[in-house]
Image: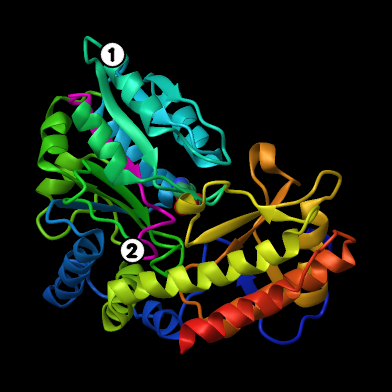
Amino acid sequence: MQENITKLRRGRHFFAGPGPTNIPDSVLHAVAHYTVDFNAPDFMEVYQACVAGLKRVLRTEHELFLYAASGHGAWEATLQNLLSPGDRILMLESGYFSLGWAAMAKKFGLVVETVPADWRYGVHITALEAALRADTQQTIRAVCVVHNETSTGVVLPLPEIRAAMDTAGHPALLLVDTISSLASMDFRMDEWGVDATVGGSQKGLMLPTGISFTAVSPKAMAAHAKATLPRHYFDWSVMARRPHHGFVGTVPIAMFYGLQESLRLLEEEGLDAVFARHARLAEAVRRAVMAWTGNAGPEIYCLAPERRSNSVTAVFLPEGFDANAVRRIAYEQFNVALGGGLERLEGRVFRIGHLGDLNEPMVLGTLGAVEMSLKLAGVPVAGRGLNAALDFLTESAR
Ligand SMILES: *Cc1c(COP(=O)(O)O)cnc(C)c1O
């Protein structure tokens, strides 16, 4: 796609990837803030309001540590602060992002065991429970879960995962990556017994890429006190001792002005309404894909209806068709950016992001461009997906 970047493009660029996401105009204006002293009282007011607001979104009253980093930084921070070399952790396989988090953990000298899964479904909770029961010495220190696997569009049921850990009587910490679910789908850190929650700025929070964070339960803070993996920038103990704010280095000031505005937008709409809007728009996308499917057309990658993500849909192409060809047409001819397939799904799926600052016309515009692109790429398309989405959105708006 790089070679066509110099082509003239007119009209709105439709960004329909699953992250980063569209940034509301008011957030764009807010991040264009002049420099202030980040230790001065004026900024501290903004900073503290952001921390309090983010905790409300996380539905937690626990500690919160923020970093000037993308989500990968928060992954690192969370492992480094909670674990020691040689510790065993259990990763629930879900797709590209669970593989990435596991690969990072191995580089830090952790012993990573995996609960394997079919990517089109995600782990069976019984398999998790069996893995925990098999650990009779209870040496597994942490269970790591990607709540919403952005590469596949599969959501894992966190309350069931918590229940399986409790039923097995296993004391491991529960570490959850909510990078592509937070502020788009229901998540309740304290109620669901999550020990460490990883999040980032550029998905449901509708901000530029640049900050990520971990919320940490008291049980995890106790584990932190004994954890010996080397850490410096991300050290929670150092951060907790900072007098004004938690940053080891310069505070990314502009991001906090943006976060203050994105939190205002989320709370103005109300979190439950935000989740309902995501559910409605996601269902419209699914209706479109199901209409395209027919006997031999593209299909929703996730095979478990109750696990289909409300923030991203991976569309699985029939054998012999190239998902990147569809993406190229959408990008070059219609100025619409779709997400690509990751790892083993490269070329097999494209992904439609439907999270963040999004409404019905944006979704319909994207689906229209996708339908045209599928047809132009010669992919067999059974029905009129755009019409199916339109009908659903009309009915659900009554
Ligand atoms: C985007 C994403 C990440 C990686 O975050 P970066 O901000 O790109 O470093 C990790 N996990 C999930 C589930 C994601 O969607």
Is residue 83 depicted above or below 248 in this figure?
above
77 relative to 104 in the view: left or right = left
Q: Is residue 36 visible?
A: yes
| Residues in magenta, as a range | 168-185
- Mark number displayed over residue 135: 1
100 relative to 40 in the view: left or right = right
**Among all residues in the image, which is located at the extreme top?**
137
- Mark number displayed over residue 66: none
Query: Which quadrant of the structure image shows residue 170?
Result: top left
Q: Residues within 10 Å of mark 1 (few under 14, many from 20)?
A: few
Residue 384 place in picture, x, y as percent: 75, 74
Is residue 185 depicted above or below 72 in this figure?
below
Q: Nearer the viewer, residue 162 or 51?
A: 162
348 relative to 121 in the view: left or right = right
Q: Which residue position is annotated with label 2? A: 252
Residue 211 place in picture, x, y as percent: 37, 58
Q: Secondary structure at mark 1?
A: loop
Mark 2 residue type: Pro
Q: Secondary structure at mark 2?
A: loop
Q: Residue at x 42, y 84 (%)?
A: 29
